[in-house]
Image (cartoon, rainbow, N blue to C red):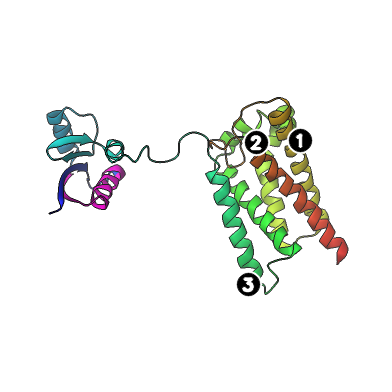
Amino acid sequence: MSQQATLYRMQTDEHICPFGLRAKDLLERKGYEVDDHPLSSREETDAFKQKHDVETTPQAFIDGKRIGGYDELRDYFGMGEAGQSGTTYTPVVAIFSVAFLVALAIQWYASESVLSLSSLLTFIGVAMTLLALQKLQDVHSFTNSFITYDLLAMRQLRYATLYPFLEAYAGIGMIAGLNAYLVAPVSLFIGLVGGVSVFKAVYIDKRELKCACVGGDSNVPLGFVSFTENVFMVLGGVLMLTIHLAF
């Protein structure tokens, strides 16, 4: 016989509570047969909260005992807090992983070797473009974080605003195979300035900061990964010039 649980969650024409759906899914995955009670209006929801003296929905009950909402359910099952908390490298790992796969796909489609300087350059270009896109979602938030450690942006705030556009230009230029003399200097410049800035902030000044590489609201710590991003930019510029001069 399956275990029984009762769930009250808000589901109106205007709003479906995502945590209610998550709570229902969690209970079902844990083997519970859920007696689901969608609260179909604001009035019904308020009446339920007043009756049970709770401030939020959803509310789950197991064996007649109130467990609480989605977070409390996770605690009940010993699963810990949902989502990301504290510093994390997950956004950077995700971006570089996707960039790597996209670069392989582009090289494969172009019937070119996936193990070549061209493939590496494509990877760097895609990664730079994706990173720029993260920053461009909220330029103001990005600049607020960026100006706390970038040496040039500290002195010229407009450079901070221009930076994600320069990064996108260089990344797209690498993918498109634009003239190296039009793209490489930009990549070399922002990579060198960024690399020196990160190295000084982290390894000389010993400051603990959040990296603006994936946007201003990220929890990615400023450090080795941030420095590596700038190394890739410099490497991309060098590769463009090398390939251009070789052919």
Quadrant of the snapshot with the C terminus:
bottom right
Give the total of numbered labels.
3
Q: Amino acid at mark 3?
A: Tyr
In the displayed structure image, the side of residue 142 where residue 22 appears, left or right: left
Residue occupied by mark 3: 109
29 in magenta = yes
Helix, strand or loop for disc 1: helix
Where residue 224 sits, quadrant-wise, is: top right
Task: Please state which amino acid type lies under the numbered disc 1.
Answer: Val
Q: Earlier in the sequence, mark 3 or mark 2?
A: 3
The stretch of residues the image draws in magenta is 18-40
- Give the crowd class for mark 1: few <14, some 14-19, many >=20 residues within 10 Å: some
Q: CA distance from mark 2 to mark 1?
A: 12 Å
Q: Could you tell me if residue 15 is visible in this image? A: no
Q: Which residue is mark 2?
A: 223
Q: Residue at x 76, y 51 (%)?
A: 235
Tell me the distance, in whole angstroms, between the alpha carbons under discs 3 and 2: 35 Å
Mark on residue 196?
1
Query: Mark 2 belongs to which amino acid?
Result: Gly
Tag 2: Cα neighbours inside 10 Å, few (<14), some, or many (≥20)?
Answer: some
Task: Pick whichever, 156 or 198, lies toward us.
Answer: 198
